[in-house]
Amino acid sequence: MSTSFNQLNSVFENTTNSYKFYWWLSILKLLKTKGNEKIELEDIVFEMLVFVWYPINYYKISLGKQDQLTKYIKEIKLNFNISDKIDDVKLMFFLKENRNIPLIKSIIKNVLKYVPYRFIRPWYPETKGTKDHAVNEYIVCLQKDIRREPPYIIQDDYVLINDKWLDFITQNYTLIENSALFELFKYVENNNPLLINISLKLFKPKNRRLAKATKLWKSFIDLQGHLHKSVFEDNHLNQIKQLSIDHFLPWSFFTHDFIWNLHPVDKSINSSKSNSLPKTSYFDFFYNLQYHFCNFLLSEKIEKPLENYYNLFNCSNEELISLTKDQFIIRMGNFYSPQYETAKNMGFKDNWSLGN
């Protein structure tokens, strides 16, 4: 199978669209969950759409200017007004329940017109130079040769996994899946050169862990809440009724819970802001609050969260202590301004303010 595995790797070379990655990952997932070598073509398309929902809608990742999956996902979201955060199971159920609606039918047809055939084309080198409209028919003819070992052969409405490939995948599933994910990671990285934590943004987000941050902010509020105001409200922190910890720039952009991007707000405000970008007029209020909170951590010698600031500013404890308020704010601004522009260019809704 080594030759076939090399051919599989060649599928992902010089790729200008994401469909090959998601087509193969969807086949692998269906093989793992259903354990059947006969896989319905329609089911593969639905898995592909579920796979790319969060990267495109929630994380605003670019899959390339020519990518058609991005177009299809945005059309589904717009036409059916589906939440960015829809559960995978619910999205799959929705797609299957609405498979006969014209838009969904059209997407299925468009994906299946080329993708199943183009994926296995490396196993049929004779098709090189063939006119595009004739490739599918040529592959259907060539796949009758049982000496070939493509991952699957294409039937009317399903693919049939090759027996040798089925054994190979069963015995090496993790290796094969990780290899495909690695190639996908490189592809996405190439299309999003300024994006951080790309590997985390290929999947639905995991639960966030804010218990420690909440405890720290509560301690700060108990001691200094009467001195400092909320970033978004003209109220002191100790007047917050239902405490919630907000990610100043959206978690879906940073995909981490570092303390320098967190601050306390009322729960209703956090819900209203969701994953929008705050108005730039709020930035100085946020930097100011962060300065006082950082100094609280320094005074209490709470080392673990302070490491977030050491890494952010590339400084030592002594250097962090010596920063004046103006210096701290300038450093925050130097970091946040370009990050804000990147997030805005990616498509995150900007200019959010309380009451809008």
Image (cartoon, rainbow, N blue to C red):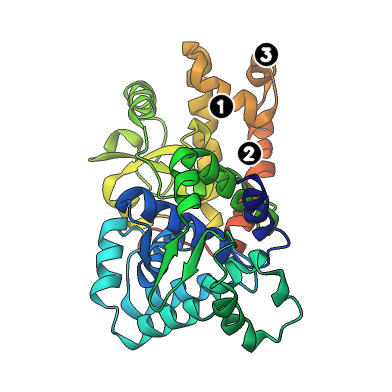
Seen at 39% across and 28% down, the residue is 213
Of residues 55 and 15, the one nearer the viewer is 15
Quick check: 114 above or below 232?
Answer: below
How packed mark 2 is, by other alpha carbons closer than 10 Å (few <14, some 14-19, many 20 or more), is many
Task: Give the side of residue 66 with respect to residue 21, left or right.
Answer: right
Q: From the image, tell me which residue sits under label 2.
A: 332
- Mark 3 / mark 2, whichever is N-terminal: 3
Q: Quadrant of residue 229?
A: top left
**Residue most toward the top?**
301
Of residues 348 and 109, the one nearer the viewer is 109
**Residue most toward the right?**
129
Mark 2 near mark 1, Cβ–Cβ under 8 Å? no
Seen at 58% across and 66% down, the residue is 119
Between the residue at mark 2 and the residue at mark 1, the CA separation in whole angstroms equals: 13 Å
Task: Give the side of residue 325 with respect to residue 216, left or right.
Answer: right
Which type of secondary structure does the marked residue at label 2 adopt?
A: helix
Q: From the image, tell me which residue sits under label 3.
A: 318
Of residues 249 and 167, the one nearer the viewer is 167
- Mark 3 / mark 1, whichever is N-terminal: 1
Quick check: 23 above or below 133?
Answer: above
Q: Amino acid at mark 2?
A: Met
Which type of secondary structure does the marked residue at label 1 adopt?
A: helix
Q: Amino acid at mark 3?
A: Glu
How packed mark 1 is, by other alpha carbons closer than 10 Å (few <14, some 14-19, many 20 or more), is some
How packed mark 3 is, by other alpha carbons closer than 10 Å (few <14, some 14-19, many 20 or more), is few
Seen at 38% across and 53% down, the residue is 31
Between the residue at mark 3 and the residue at mark 2, the CA separation in whole angstroms equals: 18 Å
Q: Is residue 144 visible?
A: yes
Residue 308, numbered label: 1
